[in-house]
Amino acid sequence: MKTDLSNHIQSVKLVDTHEHLRKEPEWLNNGPDILQDLFGNYVPADLHTAGASGQAMKDLMDSSNPDIIARFGGIREAWEATQFTGYGEAVRIIASEVYGIDEITGESLAAAQGKNRDLQKPGERYRLLHDVANLDHVQTDDFCWQCYPDDSGPDFFLYDLSWAGFCNGQVDPQSIHEEVGIEVTDLATLKQGMEAIFSKHAPIAIAVKSQHAYNRTLNWVERSDQEAREALDHILRKPEEGIDIETRLCLGDWAWAQGVALSIEYNLPFKIHTGYYAGSDRMPVSRIPAGNMCSLLARYLEAKFVLMHIAYPYSDELVAIAKHYSNVWVDMCWAWSIDPYSSRDFLRRFIHAVPINKIFTYGGDTGWATSSVAYAFQARREIQKALEAEIDDDYMNEKQAMAIATQIMHDNQYACFDLHNTRTNIRSAA
């Protein structure tokens, strides 16, 4: 039944604080077929866990084979076991809301391939995100320093400046020289290179982003210049395979801190992946809790840290961190599809423990616009359920719930990110 709250949640322009969206030329020239579109986001991990074979998954993603019924048939049983997970729900939403498919079968998928081709036309990517998903704008991490204006929507498609490589203790002198003309030979010139990267790209970036938790622990240790100098000298002299973990961590911690300091100077929030890994069979859980970063949070109180993905499954700890540290914002990006039920519970617990202006509630964390549409539908549905439960339990009335919905879906993001100046700088650069 439609209510004032449900209508309001559908109408709010949802700010999308995290994607890895592929750009317009790739959507037009190398976009997914129907099976790649539905099953190529995060659901392969659940299909693998459900027992789909590697060959079946390879066949599923092979768009050179036009036999869609056969390709789907190889993973059908795994799909039936997966369809009610958060990832599976997102697939069903893409099928219904984008392709008009009521029941996912080989035959219905084959019939939708024509619609798939129709979507891969100029402007459709923007329409799906702006009109169908009803997004205010999209913040994309495409794993690089550059944040050039996006011709398909300069005010709409905004970009993060990536700091993941530096946080991993990885230094590529050639790339730095090509980008900013500085030859990295020692710690002083590395710092100059980092400053030049920010000077060149930070004015049109919306944030700094790092997902180094995939490669190292989130535990941060303050490192002296001398310690970092010795680590860098070792890295520049030695072949890749000769560098030990501690050397990488030492330089990575130092470089991470340099990025945070520069983010303060340029008024850019610093986004950090916390919690769950994408994929399967490779997650060392000791690396991923957000609590590993408390020394960093305490050291840089002037920074804006955006801790992502509710640190799943360590979300109770993240609530406590957000309650305690004034420089922390929490981003529910991707969380709705990882575990919708726990994410709904997380939002309710957050409301009762942390000031409500410290949370963002959407980011699809995906590559294709169609997947982002699905994750936006999923987020709206779960936000509605969480706030309806708050009303039912007499914690708030509907008017208050509507005000909270606007704040967590749109207003908090505008308060944290400098949208006005970023867009102004993008227009000037364009």
Image (cartoon, helix red, strand yellow):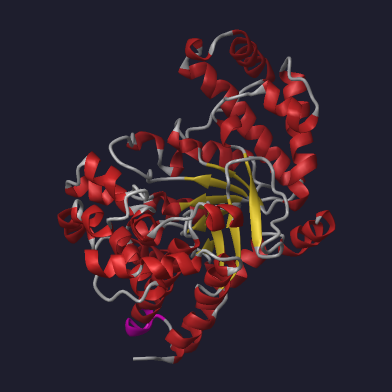
User: Residue shown at 75%/40% (left/top)?
Assistant: 198
Between residues 159 and 95, which one lies in front from this camera angle?
Answer: 95
Residue 426 in the image, given as x and y percentages of width and height: 77, 57
Quarter containing the C terminus? bottom right
Left or right, 214 with reference to 345: right
Quarter containing the N terminus? bottom left
Q: Quadrant of residue 12?
A: bottom right
Residue 326 visible in the shown view:
no
User: Residue shown at 54%/54% (left/top)?
Assistant: 29
Residue 2 visible in the shown view:
yes
User: Residue shown at 50%/85% (left/top)?
Assistant: 8
Left or right, 242 with reference to 414: left
Residue 118 in the image, given as x and y percentages of width and height: 48, 69
Between residues 321 and 27, which one lies in front from this camera angle?
Answer: 27
Q: Is residue 393 magenta?
A: yes
Left or right, 250 with reference to 53: right
Q: How many numbered circles does the render carry?
A: 0
Q: Quadrant of residue 14?
A: bottom right
Residue 230 in the image, given as x and y percentages of width and height: 63, 12
Between residues 167 and 348, which one lies in front from this camera angle?
Answer: 167
The span picked out in magenta is: 390-395
Q: Is residue 412 magenta?
A: no
Spot the residue most to the left. Answer: 77
Location of residue 59 with respect to 370 vertically, above or below = above
Location of residue 152 with respect to 317 vertically, above or below = below
Residue 171 in the image, given as x and y percentages of width and height: 62, 24
User: Residue shown at 62%/27% (left/top)?
Assistant: 254
Q: Quadrant of residue 117?
A: bottom left
